[in-house]
Each structure stands twice: as structure tokens, then as C-alpha cells.
Image (cartoon, rainbow, N blue to C red):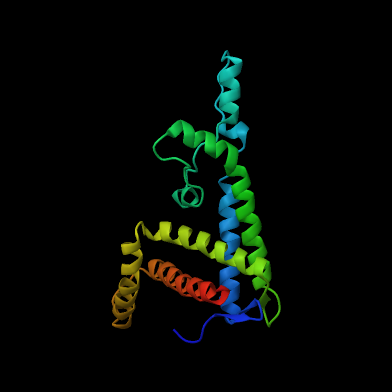
Amino acid sequence: MGSAPFKSSRGRVKVALEAQERELLARLMDDVVGLLTENEQTSAEAASISPGESDWAVLEAALSVPPPKDPAVARLLPDGNRQDPELAQGFRRLTEHGLRERKRGGLSLAATALRRPEPVVLDQAEAGALLKGMTDVRLVVAERLGLRTDEDAERLHDALRDAAHRAARGEQVDEDWIGAAAIYDALTWWQESLVSALR
């Protein structure tokens, strides 16, 4: 797929992506920050308190943090325990706000670094934030594409190639799907390159 998009450089990471690729990646990270913000429910919104409920019921409802309704955000903020809903709710109540904040902070740090003037060279904290951010973006894109397993992701490349051949023959294709699949494919390559540069 051409030269490596990320290269190790004296304990730092040089970003070899084109300017438009860096901006695309930064915008995708901005989009995930937006998703994490838009789908956040305050305790007041999440609580459904009826008049006359006991103080304990009111407190329990106020502290309740329901799982995200958007499946993509749910993949970013999964249940802490899939077998025990009560334990999962307790874990979510204690950790979700902090996890959202850390993810938003890391995504914003990475996006800001990618928008610096060339040459873009990342320190270890920025490179780590970018790696985590790309994982989050890939999870969101994977959910939008309906990718649930490793096998689904492996088949994506072949499906993308077939769709490109059909489009070249003038056949009708789902351009939105092709665009999202191409982004997922590129993210996979970029992330693998970044992992190699960090070794």
C-alpha cells in the first residue's frame, strides 16, 4: 500500500500521511468526540423519578447510568460485566463519566497534533493518544458497517475490491458503503503502521 504512513524517529513518531489524510483522520476523531458528547446523559435526564417514591428509590434512579442507545457508542463504552446486569450498572455508574472524558481528551489531543504544520512529529503521549483514538474511530466505523467479528473485518477488503470492480464496469454500487469501507480499510493500515513505529 505504499510507504509507511508512520515512521519511528528518535523515540518519536513521524507522520508521513498526506495533509488531506491527516485532516480526514482528525475530523473522524472530532466526530467521535461529538458522539461521546451528544450521547452522554446527565443523571437528571437518565433518572425517571415518580412522585411518592422512597428516598432510596430516588437516589438509585438519580445515580443510574443506562447503557448508550447508539450501538456505536455502546461499543466504545461496553458493559463491565455481561453476565450480571446489576454489577454492570454499578461499574458503569462508577466509570463511564471518567472513561468518556479520557476518550474525548485523547481524541482531541491526537486531532490537534495531526493539524500541526508539517513536518508532523508526535511525542510518545501524542502517538499513544492517536493509537487509542484510531481504535475508537475503527470501532465506530465497524459498527456503522455491521462488522461484528474478525471474520467480518477480513471479508471487508474483498467486498471493497469487488464493489470497486463493479463501479468500474458502470454497475450501481452503494457509494456511502464504499466510502465507509475505504475509510475502515485505511484506518486498519494506518493503525498497523503506527503500532510498528511505536515498537
Q: Quadrant of the C terminus?
A: bottom right
Pick the front one: 173 or 96: 96
Q: Position of residue 132 (x, y in %)?
A: 56, 62
Residue 145 higher or lower than 118, as above or below: above
Q: Position of residue 189 (x, y in %)?
A: 46, 75
Pick the front one: 90 or 63: 90
Measuring 60% from the left and 49% from the top, which residue is drawn there?
100
Give the quarter of the image for residue 129. bottom right
Residue projecting furthest to the right:
117
Residue 7 higher or lower than 79, as above or below: below
Question: So how many labels did they put on this image?
Answer: 0
Residue 41 in view here: no
Q: Position of residue 150 (x, y in %)?
A: 35, 62
Q: Quadrant of the N terminus?
A: bottom left
Q: Position of residue 97 (x, y in %)?
A: 61, 43
Pick the front one: 17 or 41: 17
Is 192 displayed left or right of 154 in the figure?
right
Is 46 displayed left or right of 83 in the figure?
right
Give the quarter of the image for residue 163. bottom left
Residue 33 higher or lower than 117, as above or below: above
Residue 83 in view here: yes
Measuring 65% from the left and 76% from the top, which residue is drawn there?
12
Measuring 47% from the left and 58% from the top, which residue is drawn there?
140
